[in-house]
Amino acid sequence: MKRFSCVVITGASSGIGAALSSLMARRTKHLVLIARRAEKLQSLAQDLRPFCKVTVLVADLSIPEQVAELCDKMDELHIEPTVLVNNAGFGLHGDFSQTDLVAEQQMINVNIHAVTTLTKWAVQSFKLNKVPGTVLNTASIGSYTPGPGMAVYFATKAFVLSFSEALHQELDKYGISVLALCPGYVKSEFHSIAGTNRAGIMNMLVKKSSHDMARTALWQIQNEIPVIVPGFINKLIVFVVRFLPRSRVRKLAEKFL
Ligand SMILES: NC(=O)c1ccc[n+]([C@@H]2O[C@H](COP(=O)([O-])OP(=O)(O)OC[C@H]3O[C@@H](n4cnc5c(N)ncnc54)[C@H](OP(=O)(O)O)[C@@H]3O)[C@@H](O)[C@H]2O)c1
């Protein structure tokens, strides 16, 4: 099993990010945990310190200035990543004519702006230090379809998948891998924050635990698999939508959400 020297994980305070941090602690010398909730990060860091050095950095990734400060801070601390996991993200459910624009702009900042900025920071560090590094971006099964009812969220995740695949190809010549993990329904705080309607067809989906998803993410990083859609039903959905007319895909996605 591969071991890493420094792994940076955003969204480490809960769900998939917290579970992946626990798994990574046993496989890296230095773990950098990033999110807004300092107490959650500190308590996780305390649990993981027997296994590796842990640095906690608190930042609100919806504020571009804080993302820039975070990159400066990591440079100041001489943090040279071998793996970056851009996992922080959130969604919002609702009719676009009524949803909160500020919240949507914050979502775009976390799901797109921070992912782009931190990926640039990591890739430049990999090149400078001649490290064949890896970036794992958490996309979604929603990266493959439009999302009526969660239009902005699905669009941000379409960006993440396209961005990751393009960079994976482009940066291969430097030995750098940029991977996209595309989960379906994962049990985490995500759904209460997004206000996802659980009474819909969504309720029929197989729900993976954050720990299961973290194990898949670790395996993906270890084996440098460019894109993973975890679970048979999710794979089937992604396969089938390729052959359906877009009008049908839009209608099905609306029913689903
Ligand atoms: N759960 C699902 O069904 C599902 C499906 C597909 C994709 N995903 C994606 O998987 C990723 C992880 O989600 P999860 O399911 O583990 O949800 P979660 O438990 O809600 O975790 C989200 C993480 O993102 C962090 N975060 C949110 N806004 C932030 C901000 N402004 N600044 C810094 N950190 C922020 C949160 O930390 P703080 O609140 O402490 O800042 C938290 O650690 C997300 O990108 C999500 O879009 C989830």
Image (spheres, rainbow, N blue to C red):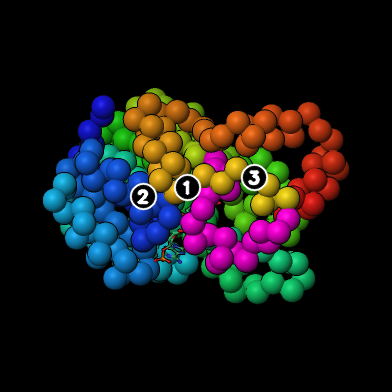
Q: Look at discs 2 and 3 and give the one toward the viewer.
A: 3
Instruction: Evaluate if marks 2 and 1 touch, with contact meaning CB atoms under 8 Å apart.
Output: yes
Comparing 142 with 79, the one in front is: 142
At x 26% / y 29%, what residue is drawn?
A: 2
Give coordinates of residue 185: x percent, y percent: 58, 48
Decide if residue 90 is in sight here.
Answer: yes
> Mark number for residue 205?
3
At x 35% / y 46%, what residue is drawn?
A: 20
Residue 217 vertical position relative to residue 95 in the rendered view, above or below: above
The stretch in magenta equals 182-200
The tag earlier along the polypeptide, 2 or 1, is 2
Label 2 to label 1: alpha-carbon separation: 10 Å
Q: Amino acid at mark 1?
A: Ser
Q: Amino acid at mark 3?
A: Leu
Helix, strand or loop at label 1? It is: strand
Is residue 130 within the magenta segment? Answer: no
Residue 96 vertical position relative to residue 141 in the rendered view, above or below: below
Is residue 184 within the magenta segment? Answer: yes
Q: Which residue is mark 1?
A: 209
Q: Which residue is mark 2?
A: 19
Label 3 to label 1: alpha-carbon separation: 13 Å
Comparing 208 with 118, the one in front is: 208
The tag earlier along the polypeptide, 2 or 3, is 2
